[in-house]
Image (spheres, grey):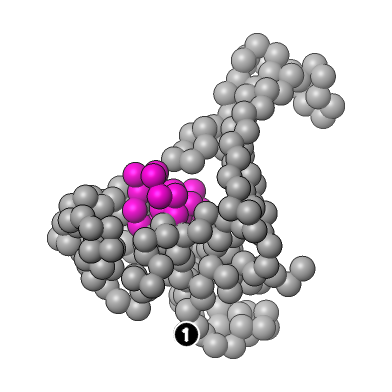
Amino acid sequence: RGGFLHAPDMYMHKLVTGSAGIGVVDIQVSAAENIRRLAAAKNCQPQDLTVIVLDKPRHVDLIDEIRKAGARCQMIPDGDVAAGIAAAVDDSGINMMIGTGGAPEGVLTAAAVKCLGGFMQGQLAFMNDDERNRASKMGINDFDRIYSAEELAQGDVFFAATGVTNGDLVNGVRYFAGGAKTHTVVMRSKSRTVRFIETRHYFDHKPGFDSCSTC
């Protein structure tokens, strides 16, 4: 209790990388500069990096900047929690997640990033005075503060996520006759343990589940 930032339902600027970004990238500099810094830290070229971004109108200029910097840009329609987690996994093929998404989702991302030993910064993006007033009532008074992953999700953190649809980290629900198969990732920050669990659910033996008429 009290370990997670009680983030209001608003936007947050986010920057996530794997461990190579620690002490290297900074949300206060441009995306192009962060790409150059990360490429240097990884001893590669900007064109060797893949940056994942939400495909939203607010990111048109950001996407253009990433491409002009030479990096590959992977655009997704939604789901920046999974995108942030992928960026924190060193061998996922995603090297950076940058952009503006939901603040509560940013806190969830920070919990996973802590477990993975990656890097994250987040800064609340206020659209109007009403959002500032709501944040103030929730105990947030420094509106320009840049939060680290540790500040967003403090202490010994456990993270678990089960896929509904297919993503970069986990597969979605797959139905078979009489049941369904789910894919789950479970992590702990203290031990840096990451487990992937595949589970078969049989509806006839699972209270609360009805047989799927489409199976």
Residue at point 80%, 16% (across, down):
204
Point out residue 178 in the picture as x, y percentages from the top left corner.
70, 14
Point out residue 94 in the picture as x, y percentages from the top left corner.
35, 48
Residue neighbourhood size for the residue with mark 1, other residues' Cα within 10 Å, grouped as few (<14), some (14–19), many (≥20): few
Q: Residue furthest right?
A: 207
Question: 186 left or right of 32?
Answer: right
Q: Which residue is mark 1?
A: 144
Q: Which quadrant would residue 59 be assigned to in this image?
A: bottom left
Point out residue 194 in the picture as x, y percentages from the top left corner.
58, 45
- Relative vertical location of residue 24 with respect to residue 132 in this rendering, above or below: above
Q: Quadrant of the N terminus?
A: bottom right
Q: Which residues are magenta?
A: 80-97
On the question of residue 134 being in view, the answer is: yes
- Relative vertical location of residue 71 with respect to residue 162 in this rendering, above or below: below
Question: 202 left or right of 27?
Answer: right
Residue at point 47%, 71% (across, down):
122
Point out residue 52 in the picture as x, y percentages from the top left corner.
34, 52
Mark 1 is on which residue type?
A: Asp
Q: Quadrant of the C terminus?
A: top right
Q: Which quadrant would residue 154 be assigned to in this image?
A: bottom right
Closest to the observer, 12 or 181: 181
